[in-house]
Image (cartoon, rainbow, N blue to C red):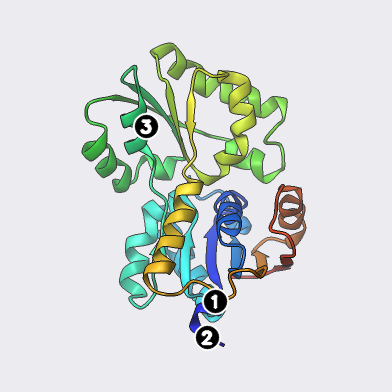
Amino acid sequence: MFYSELPVGIFDSGLGGLSVWQQFTRLLPAEHTVYLADQAFCPYGPRAAAEIASRAEAITRFLLQKKCKLIVVACNTATAAAIAHLRERFTETAFVGMEPAVKPAAKLTRTGHIGLLATAGTLKGDLLEKTSRMHASHVQVHRQEGTGLVELVERGLQDSPRAVALLASYLRPMLQAGADQLVLGCTHYSFLINSIIKVAGTQLNIIDPAPAVAQRAKDLLQQQNLLHSNTGGPGRHQLFSTLGADALQRFVESLSQLPAGSSCSFARQAI
């Protein structure tokens, strides 16, 4: 097997990283993937950075055992807490992480006010502070911890009245302050876009980082000459959960527009 035909590894605390996985498989339908949802430890947001880094390292070792040629940390909290550690520990592996899309929001705003909905871990991370200083010092960033939202997505309740009510309590202060951009600072929140629209309508332009991260992964593979050689064939996808595969499989099967002919397998994986 050529090195380019090896899979791309993607991991998250749970189902949220599937937003990145979905974009990646649409962009590169020939690529094989290994996805790991660390649902036994979800959510990561309230956990200590050291614990998240330990989990990320253990998951990375699993993905490398699966011969992954590139690893996407499809979790804002894990990126903030662990990606520097991963790059230092696994020097021969390329990593793509999440970054709160504050820069494009700051460029697009007409009111000078942008909203950021994120987990506690992301809001406390140095990466957000650095990005905000570099790109958003001239605007007002209204930060809001999305307590409870990850859990709703994990339970498949992203379109429920409870999700809409919770989002309303988080977004209305931003709207009242004049925010016209909303940065989704957690991959789980991509699945809440319909509920966000129910609350904000067209008042907020929603910036979902998942497409940009998928594009970054593609660019990196291209730069390293690692794109799969069979550009016309469907990829094979192995999806694992540290809790149990049933919820993961139901969620994946509910996603629309999966690549035609692609195959998915599901299993529990203790890590």
Quarter of the rendering occupied by the N terminus: bottom right
> How far apart are the alpha carbons under marks 1 and 3?
36 Å
Choose between 10 and 3: the one closer to the eye: 3
* Residue 150 in view in this figure: yes
Distance between the alpha carbons at the discs numbered 2 and 3: 40 Å
Kindly identify which numbered label has been placed on residue 106: none
Coordinates of residue 121 in the picture (x, y in percent) = 42, 45
- Point 32% across, 42% down: residue: 128
Please identify the residue farthest to the front as the structure is shown: 232
Q: Nearer the viewer, mark 2 or mark 3?
A: 2
Mark 1 vs mark 3: give the one in front: 1
Q: Amino acid at mark 3?
A: Ala
Q: Nearer the viewer, residue 92 or 41?
A: 92
Question: Residue beneath label 2, please?
Answer: 2
Q: Identify the element where label 3 is drawn.
A: helix
Instruction: Give the residue number, with chain letter if any, for mark 3.
Output: 105
Q: Earlier in the sequence, mark 2 or mark 3?
A: 2
Examine the rendered structure and indicate whether residue 150 appears above or below residue 144.
Answer: below
Mark 2: which amino acid? Phe
What residue is pinned by disc 1?
A: 229
Q: Secondary structure at mark 1?
A: loop
Q: Residues within 10 Å of mark 3 (few under 14, many from 20)?
A: many
Q: Name the front one of labels 1 and 2.
A: 1
**Crowd tier of the residue under label 2, counting other residues whose Cα lies within 10 Å: few below 14, some 14–19, many 20 or above:** few
Asked which secondary structure carries label 2, the reply is loop
Label 1 – label 2 distance at C-alpha: 9 Å
